[in-house]
Image (spheres, rainbow, N blue to C red):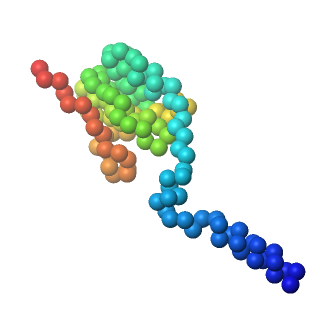
Amino acid sequence: MKLGIPLVALGLLCTGCGGGDAEQSSQNVTRIKAANPVSDQLKGMTEIYRYLGLRRAITDSGQRCKKVDRGAYQEDYKTMALWTAHCTDTGDWAIFIAPNADVQVRRCGHMEQLGLPACRVSPAPQS
C-alpha cells in the first residue's frame, strides 16, 4: 500500500506532461532571433559599398567575382541572414551570414540540390 500511493501520484504527474495537440504545443514555443550586426551593417550601407561587401564575401571564400552589379538581403534562414549577389563574370551567388560574422557562399544553382532556399536575385536593370 505504501508503494501504491507514490506510483499513482507519479502516474498523474506524467499524464499532465505532453500529449497535447501538436498545433497547440507549436503555438506555445517562444522563438528568439539572434542579432546579426554584420548583416545589419550591410543593410545600412549605400549600394556601392553593399556590393563591395558582397563581392568581398565571395572572393574571401575562394570564388571569383569581378564585380557585383546587383545584390540584396533575401531572408533569414535558420540563424543566418541570406543575401544574394550577381557577379558580372560568374553569375548568381547566395551569401549566408551568421550572427558571429561567419560567412558561407554557395552558387545559386546549387541551392535546391543542397536543400536550401532558392535564390531570388533581382533582375538586371533595363538599359
Image quarter of the N terminus: bottom right
Left or right position of 55 against 125: right
Q: Position of residue 33 (x, y in %)?
A: 52, 37
Judge by depth and name the residue closer to the eye, 37 or 86. Answer: 37
Total numbered badges shown on the rendered structure: 0
Residue found at x 36% / y 30%: 73
In the picture provided, is 115 more to the left or to the right than 38? left
Residue 112, percent from left and from top: 32, 49
Q: Residue at x 27, y 25 (%)?
A: 70
Location of residue 94 in the rendering, given as x and y in whole percent from the top left corner: 36, 36
Question: Relative to the observer, which residue lies in front, 68 or 24?
Answer: 24
Residue at coordinates 46% horizontally, 60% vertically from top-left? 23
Asked where in the image residue 16 lies, by quadrant, the reply is bottom right
Q: Is residue 76 visible?
A: yes
Q: Is residue 74 left or right of residue 20?
A: left
Q: Residue at x 35, y 45 (%)?
A: 117
